[in-house]
Image: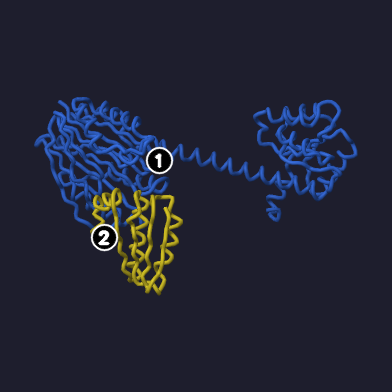
Amino acid sequence: MDVISQIVNGVYTVSLIGHFTFTDNPEFRDILEVIPKPEITQIIVQMDKVDFVDSAALGMLLLARESAEKHGKKLVISGTQGQVKRIFEMARFDQIFNFI
Amino acid sequence: MLNNPDILSHLHASAILIVDDDPVSRTFIEMTLRNRGFKNLYSVDSAEKAMEHLICRAPELVILDIFMSGLTGLECCTWIRQQPKFKDLPVLMLTGMTDEKLRGQSFQAGATDFVSKPLHPEELCGRVNVHLLNRLSMKSLQRYKERLELELEGARELQAAILPNETEIREAQQQCQLEFAGHLDSSSEIGGDFWGFKRLLQQQMALWTVDFSGHGVASALNAFRLQAYLKESTPFSDAPGEYLGHLNEKLLRLLLRGHFATMFYGVVDPVVNRLHYACACSPHPLILKKKGAVHQLDGTGLPLGLEPHVYATQQVEFRVGDTLVLYSDALTETPDENGRYITENDIAEVLSANASAPASVLMQRILTYFEKHSAAPLRDDLTLSICKRVE
């Protein structure tokens, strides 16, 4: 997986690209370290270019959500499609994540 | 690493074989190494004697002169590499020339490195240290790997032991007229998937498949814990939804953050010809009817261990001749050579064509189809479990 991220006006936008799996743990740890920073108010995880997620990837997204909540920030997910969309629906993630 | 007294004393205790027919050079090497603390030195004056020595001893390093009367150092080195136990033994060639051709031949014969003549104490010790250290690291890595493999093998056996065994499967068939078949193929050495069943009151039978997030040891340990609990606890027999809610609360307390489990939990009630079930993100629950029709059940539901949640109990007709089929995503997410994926329709066709087959045959048909239509290594654990009502 590739990660492109930027911070503009307090909005931390993370674009994920490719297969998002167990092996991407180190990259995602970096993202988790940025979330608590005081200058950030909102996190947008763009997933429109992710074509595959495994259960470990879902686990990492859940950690991101938890960290955002703990620090009083809003995390939203955008653009799930294909296998990713199907898994999110199957897992009823609409009940625990905000989507745009 | 050479500052570490343990490693240094280990290096100095390493056996080193010195092979040189020139007594002056041999003594020089011995003296130099001994002065630097090396204690375990053996010297011989010919390749033949070196080979004799190597047959019954296994040094950690050989210093080998190229030009000797009798067999040359190159021939001796070639012989060393032919011995399986010496394929990784460091062999340092002593050469008085800066002849590139000779160096090339030495490497071809299997030499590890060179020490040039005339000898310089610093260079000699430097090279000996480097190669001994390499060997030490390789050996300790190898030992670590072997130990890990042994432990994983043990864990795999334990994991297999908590799955339904042949006796339990036979008993379920004889006493409850239910045929069970299961298959687990882990994408790593050990995985977090399992399936099982348990007889409840009267003729009711509870059954489940579970997949813990992630791969490897952490998810296997979680799987162990839940399987043990499922086997021991008394489930709310006729209310799978309530039972999933109960397990969810339990896992909310037990699991580390970011970990979760997906699960199908069902209860077969032969008296009313029904399967009551609840799902926590169970990918593809399918019912194969006696005549070959295939129905997909609703598998949606929040995975266990994330948030408090109310799970709905659903029910479906389940008569003699009907089959419940549960499989993990790996079945439809492992492409063949052309990048084509098995679709849910493909699975349904295989099932329909084998609607009258026993559970174990049905399982075999799906696995054969999978092997034929997938090429890539598994990205995720492949789990398959089947329960069929028979006469």
Question: What hue does chain A carry in this figure?
Answer: yellow
Residue that mark 1 sits on? B187
Which residue is nearer to you in this view: B371 or B194?
Answer: B371
Disc 1: host chain? B
Q: Secondary structure at mark 1?
A: loop
The image shows residue B389 at horizontal and vertical percentages of: 17, 30
Residue at the outermost right position? B24
Q: Is residue B33 left or right of residue B335?
A: right
Q: How does the figure colour the protein chain or chains? A: by chain
Q: Tell me what residue is drawn at x 36 percent, y 53 percent.
A: A57
Residue B369 place in picture, x, y as percent: 31, 30
User: Label 2 sits on what residue type?
Assistant: Ile
Place residue B324 in its image quadrant: top left
Task: Give the letter of the chain under mark 2.
Answer: A
Residue that carries the numbered disc 2 in the rendered image: A96
Give the vertical position of A20 relative to B276 (above or below): below
Separation of disc 1 and disc 2 at Cα?
29 Å
Marks 1 and 2 in Cβ contact (< 8 Å):
no
Q: Quadrant of the C terminus of chain B?
A: top left
Q: Secondary structure at mark 2?
A: loop
Q: Quadrant of residue B131?
A: top right
Q: Residues within 10 Å of mark 2 (few under 14, many from 20)?
A: few
Question: In the image, residue A31 lies at what x, y percent?
Answer: 42, 62
Position above or below: A40 against B130: below
- Examine the rendering and report whether any part of residue B56 can be seen: no
Q: Look at the image and tell me whether residue B342 can be seen.
A: yes
Please state which of residues B316 and A90 is positioned toward the viewer in this rendering: A90
Q: Colour of chain B?
A: blue
In the image, taking residue B206 as reference, residue B100 lies left or right, namely right
Which residue is more in the foreground, B334 or B380?
B334
| Residue found at x 30% / y 48% | A83
Amino acid of disc 1? Ser
